[in-house]
Amino acid sequence: MNSNNSQFISRRSLAVEWSGIRTISAKISKMGNGAISLAVGQPDFDTPQHIREAAKAALDQGYTRYPPSKGFEDLRQAIARKLKTKNNIQADPDSEIFISVGAMQSIFNAILVLVHPGDEVIVLDPGFIYNSQIRLFGGVPVPIFAQEKNRFKIDPKDIRKAVTPKTRLIILNTPSNPTGAVFDRDILVEIADIARHFGIFILSDEAYEDIVFDGKHVSIASLDGMKDLTVSVFTFSKTYAMTGWRVGYVAARSEVIDEMEKLMEHMCSGVTAVSQRAALAALQGPQDSVSEMVKEYKARRQLVGELLDDIEGLSFCIPEGTFYIYVNIAGTKRKSWELADYLVRNQKVGTVPGNAFSQNGADHIRLSFAADKEKLIEGLSRIGKGIEAIMRI
């Protein structure tokens, strides 16, 4: 059905924007062989062998039927142990943990469960694509702008100023997509003080908790008095290179988890049984592969920084975590969509326009260094040539 027949589509659905990430990815996929994507945040590593073997064994063991809506009990127990030892979060596996279809479903469910029509949701800008989900359920996104001069770390005072009687939720993402900023403990303590004072829930998106190069990841739910005010979201996708397996999880108070379990039957019944068995193996098996991948990402971060330094018109902050770098393109005299589209069409290299993440993103693009070094070197070379050419126009 073409756009001329959009009157048949609900206003609710039409209010959701197409993702800038997917728009660029679709364009680059049509380029065929020789195209390089530095757009999608997908680890280029294979899922570790022992995790894949666990999935194969699960098929032979009969894990081909409907799973429990909340997730398998042994997986929830393993997650509870991980949360206690790694995140300093005490969560009851029976009532406070829910297995989701990646982190995205956890985020979707949390907004659906917590946000009433007309409620305000504070989001960080630049930030991940939460706004569409907020609007889908009648909420109102309230952006708080993080400044590049502060390495894109939010000032809690700005959050405090944005709080109104309608504020229902604050969404945090640290380490941050797209900027790679890691919020210091002191920042999170101040945000926690605000949340406790006003009784505001925190949705903490911690998808990149293990991909940290500088500083230390802190889960805000571990701070005093924050467990019952926080919905903590995690995923196996980034840590274990399991994006296609679609397994995430959420830790929250039992009332929130109960609603998520109830809604699961109306969404997709449950997370694929085989994927859950693989996730259990990921938690219980050796963790060497995680540290090896992070070590490689760190080396790639240095490489990309060196290559970007040689391109006139670009500047950037070195990311403290994730595998993204948020590049300032103001010196090119071009805006983000224009430049990203030009690079796809003329250089066959994909980047994401900063406008996909920020109201003020016209002067930035996001690059992913979740690609091997050869592709990074070639991709950055193409970007350099493209910018040199476009600046001559």
Image: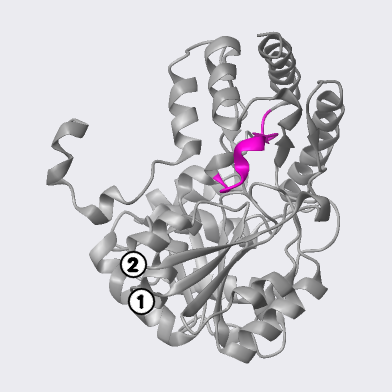
With 9 as the anchor, is 96 left or right in this view? right
Q: Where residue 388 sits: x, y (%)?
A: 74, 12
Q: Quadrant of residue 71?
A: bottom left
- Residue 231 higher or lower than 315, as above or below: below
Give the structural element (helix, strand or loop) at label 1.
loop
Between 285 and 220, the residue placed more toward the observer is 220
Type of amino acid under label 1? His
Q: Dividing the image into 4 quarters, which one contains the N terminus?
A: top left
Q: Dividing the image into 4 quarters, which one contains the C terminus?
A: top right
Give the residue number, with chain letter if any, for mark 2.
Answer: 138
Sequence-wise, the earlier of marks 1 and 2 is 1
Q: Where residue 11 sits: x, y (%)?
A: 23, 53
Write the residue at 31% across / 67% down.
Answer: 264
Give the residue number, with chain letter if any, for mark 1.
Answer: 116
Between 157 and 261, the residue placed more toward the observer is 157
Between 92 and 225, the residue placed more toward the observer is 225
Write the residue at 57% across / 10% down.
Answer: 346
Q: Is residue 136 magenta?
A: no
Q: Quadrant of residue 185?
A: bottom right
With 112 as the anchor, is 304 left or right in this view? right
Disc on res. 380? none
Q: Where residue 88 sits: x, y (%)?
A: 71, 78
For the record, the magenta segment spans 357-371
CB within 8 Å, label 1 to label 2 = yes
